[in-house]
Amino acid sequence: MTTDVLLGLQWGDEGKGKIVDVLTPDYDIIARFQGGPNAGHTLEFNGIKHVLHTIPSGIFHDTNINVVGNGVVIDPIVFKKEMDALKKLGVDIRKKLLISRRAHLILPTHKFLDAASEASKGKDKIGSTLKGIGPTYMDKTGRNGLRVGDILLDNFREKYDFLVAKHEQILAFHKFEYDLKTAEKEWFDSLASLKELEFIDSEYYLNTAMNADKKILAEGAQGSMLDIDFGTYPFVTSSNTVTAGACTGLGIAPGKIGRVIGIFKAYCTRVGSGPFPSELNDETGEKMRQIGKEFGSTTGRPRRCGWLDLPALKYAIMINGVTEMMMMKADVLNEFDEIKICTAYSYKGKKIDHLPYTFNQEDLTPHYVSMKGWNSEIKTDKNALPTALIAYIEFIEKECGVPISIVSVGPDRTQTIMMDKEKV
Ligand code: GDP
Ligand code: IMO
Ligand code: MG
């Protein structure tokens, strides 16, 4: 069996968590491959609303295993809170959650370094979630990091102290004030919870599973436009959020990747700084934010809102090799008379249909096509979709050359419309 990949095509928060939960019954294993507690994946079912940060979104089903892969960065404090919240809901995580020994650990000082770095950037700050993601991946690629497997080594404390001493020198350079003692105590206490779980060589585990015909779904975090290489650098996260990240973040060979499922919202959002060509700083954007409840799942920050951006979407489809798409939050546009789609930009006097290497948002003017809104509720019956919604879906499919296999019309598991299977 191959591994299917599910990932975000925009700037994150597309609704990946909801769809992973919906698709989990079709899979044996759900595996996260990058990112860490900067992610916030929301699941709603049976009146429960739950936000997951590091734990894969298949955790509420009893029939499958969830794996935190080597490409993920783990903060034991956040992880313990996630475990405790799931235990309260009666989820027996020890039986169905495995962690890669090679996943890197977020130390308390990584979070201080994140805050110090953002403070030093002033108005150019990234708008990081301040979860320590950037500094942890820096230590990984700088070959200084601590990994989950190290927790069980005799010299773990020594390794920890060595790295913290390095961090303290940088924090002193930044003249950053922090309380390490308190944070450190909570961190070491939380390691006990992490140790309740089985640490595995996830690359062997997943490849053995594939050879035994098990079905794996790789769950992406963030979105393609936040990718460290292909996103709107430097306003990005510090990992490869694209399909290639699933190969390196799980140890799965490129030829073993099957379906690539790209998730996108029927409009666009972004949280944090950085260019967003189709952003609406007006009452239309505010209407999207209110109806779509566009406030961050991890930080609570208001998300910036705007129309669907096709050049950016097509770019993400190209980089990821997307084989099918799923359109989320169509219901949020139920009360709009007119819906616009950005199809190109004007940049330095020229019309272009790609994002430039680097640009200021104000230098790009979006070109829009205007479509009629459907102005009605959407029933969860694919045969009863409003004509204007069908036109919207078909326009996107034609422009992108990729079929839309699911249309989501509400946050709950059940508010999901399966489109024609034969198109996929
Ligand atoms: P993720 O990070 O990609 O998993 O997405 P988030 O959970 O951060 O943000 C998506 C938000 O939209 C969550 O609050 C979901 O409950 C909600 N959501 C998901 N799908 C839909 C949908 O089709 N309609 C509406 N109205 N809300 C949705
Ligand atoms: P999910 O998985 C939306 C954004 C932050 C910031 C930038 C860098 O829920 O879609 P970082 O903390 O990684 O240093 O932040 O990336 N960001 C996200 N935006 N959804 C996410 O995850 C995000 N994870 C990071 O707002 O602009
Ligand atoms: Mg999110």
Image: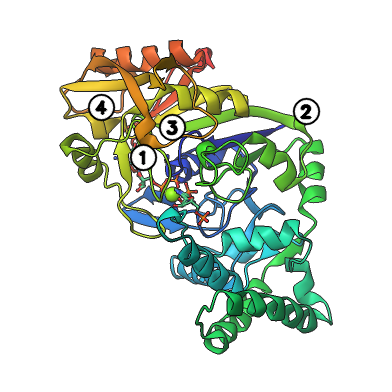
Residue 255, which numbered label?
A: 2
Q: Does mark 4 have its CB less than 8 Å from ligand 1?
A: no
Numbered circles on residues, count:
4
Between marks 2 and 3, how big is the CA–CA gap? 25 Å
Q: Which residue is mark 1?
A: 269
Q: Which residue is mark 3?
A: 264
Q: Looking at the picture, does residue 3 appear above or below residue 80?
A: above
User: Where does the image place residue 48, in percent across and percent down from the top left?
Assistant: 35, 56
Amino acid beneath label 4: Lys
Q: Looking at the picture, does residue 38 appear above or below residue 164?
A: above
User: Where does the image place residue 344, in percent across and percent down from the top left?
Assistant: 40, 18
Between marks 2 and 1, how big is the CA–CA gap? 32 Å
Q: Which residue is mark 4?
A: 379
Question: In this image, 110 relative to 139: left or right?
Answer: left
Amino acid beneath label 3: Phe
* In front: label 1 or label 4: 1
Question: In this image, 220 relative to 389: left or right?
Answer: right
Which comes before the other along the chain, label 3 or label 1?
3
